[in-house]
Image: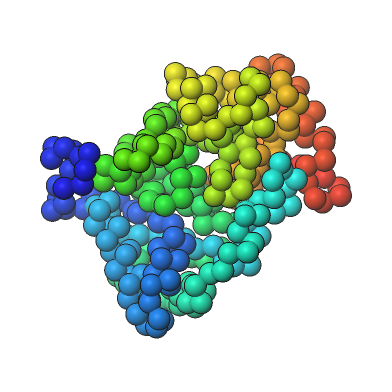
Amino acid sequence: MRPGLLPEAIPDQFEGCVSGRTLILDGDGPAYVVAATVKKLDTAIRRFQQEMLTQLFLTRSESVRVHLTASTSKKAGRYNILAEKPYQGNRESKSKPPLLEPLRQAMRLRENWLPEFDSVQMHFDIEADDAMMQDAYRLKDDAVIWSDDKDLRMTPYPYFEKGTGRVMPGEATGKLWLAYTEAGAGKLLGQGPLFFWAQMLMGDTADNIKGIKKYDGKLCGFSGAYNVLKDVTCVNDAANIVLDGYRAIDQNPLAEGWLLWLLRWPGDNFYNYLKELALTPQNTDFIEDCVRRRWFKDESNECESN
């Protein structure tokens, strides 16, 4: 038994699947792991298929939609954003397993799909995370997201929590909690839109996103983000609290938010999301001022808000 889990917390692994449930799965992580541990493509394909079936079993899903990010993907224009740090700039020197791209390309072919595969999609304009979020908003409670990438925690719909081995129901606002390893290393976990606003404070080291430079005069890591937002019960309140912090130091939140926000549907973006919220007049004026600043590499610097 895994340390820290009580017997009653372990799900019945022999329960049947939930009728109509679709697993929305980030295939980039499993593809990387498989490609790094085998030498032949046919073996990699079988291992990848097995990994998909394992996740179907754990999430009690009937079918799976797998999303992959092409090596040449434009990633929803994130590379063109002038944020505090260059997007994924910490990955430039990292080599990738030689089998990674052949495996991802092979899994696009229907001949390598299993009957449980609803689709395997490679994305060239957006990231797999964006496509997964779009699936979540389309399928809502009939699907569950599984990903090693913590960004997907911002979904308001069902999410597979690996720490407990359970599918967590959707969270309209969300919640946050701290987790620690046996060695004492900590991190902030959560679910729902509240986790997105926590990332706006603490950033995302995996993607080289700074987040806010300082909040209330202090650096804001995972514990700082937790302390600021742990008692918030309304998304509008979370947004205004975070934007108050950005406004206090005159840091443009659009750049950081554009990198962190996952697209809910084609044409969606962080600016449109902000316009849906009940922001204070001060924060509304601040956002409109920030839109006019230079935060795109494109010289026209036009905010595509349609």
Q: Residue at x 73, y 33 (%)?
A: 252
**Place of residue 278 in the rendered image (x, y in percent of width and height, measured from the top left):** 60, 21
Q: Quadrant of the C terminus?
A: top right
Residue pushed farthest top? 281
Left or right of residue 44, residue 124 in this image? right
**Place of residue 91 in the rendered image (x, y in percent of width and height, measured from the top left):** 60, 59
Counting labels gives 0
Work out whether residue 199 or residue 129 is closer to the camera in this orientation and state it: 199
Q: Specify whether residue 77 is in view.
A: no
**Place of residue 201 in the rendered image (x, y in percent of width and height, measured from the top left):** 58, 31
Compared with residue 116, is residue 172 higher up or lower down, i.e. above or below? above
Left or right of residue 293, residue 287 in this image? left
Q: Specify whether residue 101 is in view.
A: yes
Compared with residue 220, is residue 135 higher up or lower down, i.e. above or below? below
Left or right of residue 222, residue 25 in this image? left
Left or right of residue 72, residue 290 in this image? right
Q: Residue at x 32, y 37 (%)?
A: 169
Q: Residue at x 70, y 36 (%)?
A: 254
**Place of residue 235 in the rendered image (x, y in percent of width and height, measured from the top left):** 51, 25
Q: Residue at x 32, y 47 (%)?
A: 162
Residue pushed farthest right? 299
Compared with residue 210, is residue 39 higher up or lower down, i.e. above or below? below
Work out whether residue 12 or residue 115 is closer to the camera in this orientation and state it: 12
- Asked which colour scheme the image uses, the reply is rainbow
Work out whether residue 95 or residue 260 is closer to the camera in this orientation and state it: 95
